[in-house]
Image (cartoon, coloured by chain):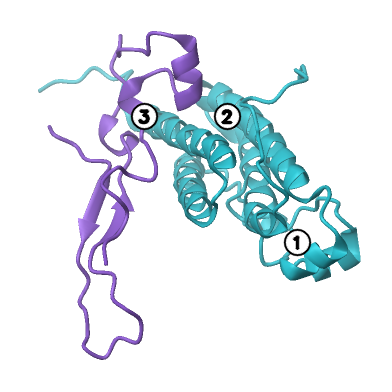
Amino acid sequence: MHQTNTKYYYPYISPFDPCPPIIRKSYSTPPQLYMGFQPTNLVQFNTAKEALFCGTLWPAFHDPYPPKEGREDN
Amino acid sequence: MWYYEKKLQYPVRVRECNPQLAKYLIEQYGGADGELSAALRYLNQRYTIPNKVVGLLNDIGTEEFAHLEMIATMVYKLTKDATPEQMEKAGLAPHYANHDNALFYHNSAGNPWTATYIQSKGDPIADIYEDIAAEEKARATYQWIINLSDDPELNDSLKFLREREIIHSQRFREAAQMLIDEKDKKQFF
């Protein structure tokens, strides 16, 4: 299963909207929504330092924010 | 009983005096989905939940206090040398009038923390589902604060805290599954 941590959607834009429209909006769908029970022997980071900086021992749970593909587009 | 380690769970660095940002961050200190609410919710719920998930609530509740301490450090550093004029400019004059530059448990709109933010229903499923929701709300709050903040070093710590919310949510989801699963029963198909 290919899982993405950010979903994008395109709200309706009215010709009468008062603010310049944001064409693409996003919301977060981090890894815990898909994992179910954590599988045994899930791969860990190589060093404790990497794990600390990410806030988790397992790369599979790492969810960078803001997303690389951006949050919204005008 | 707790042992105290005299260090933060993750380093907190703040680039500049910024009371405006402190005003937003206080949401995670004394807000409905903040760290205080989380810690008190879990540590209180743990008494009336099946044995197999007591330890989880205990550990996560304890970690929330470590997060609370990080938020306190951030807010303190962001405001410690702010003049009354700077506080006023950040919209913190009402806070200053009551508290000087001291921290207080209220949200970013100035509403004091209240126990009505949390619940212990005595129903394990209801309680764990509330906990999952609380973690997702705290994650979202961190996102909105990161979006408002232009302090890269502070954001680094906030990203760590956001990731912890993800892990906590995962563990509560596993706890819910443990309470739901018919593990002891022989299953015939």
- Asked if marks 1 and 2 touch (Cβ < 8 Å), the reply is no
B97 left or right of B150 in image: right
**What residue does disc 3 label?**
A62
Q: Which amino acid does label 3 sit on?
A: His
Q: Compared with residue A16, is residue B28 higher up or lower down, i.e. above or below?
A: above
Judging from the image, what secondary structure is the residue with disc 2 in?
A: helix
Residue at image point 69% right, 46% down? B16
Q: Which chain is cyan?
A: B
| Viewer-proximal residue among B48 and B150 | B150
Kindly identify which chain the residue marked by label 1 belongs to: B
Q: In which quarter of the image is residue A27?
A: bottom left
Q: Which amino acid does label 1 sit on?
A: Pro
Residue at image point 23% right, 68% down? A23
B64 left or right of A46 in image: right
- The picture places residue B188, in percent across and down from the top left corner, at 14, 20
Kindly identify which chain the residue marked by label 2 belongs to: B
**What residue does disc 2 label?**
B60
Circle on res. B112: 1
Residue A73 shows in the view: yes
Q: The purple chain is which one?
A: A
Judging from the image, what secondary structure is the residue with disc 1 in?
A: loop
- Asked if marks 2 and 3 touch (Cβ < 8 Å), the reply is no
**Quadrant (top left, top right, bottom left, bottom right) of the C terminus of chain B:** top left
Q: What residue type is labelled 2?
A: Ile
Nearest to N terminus: mark 1 or mark 2: 2
Q: In which quarter of the image is residue B171?
A: top left
**Label 1 and label 2 in one chain:** yes
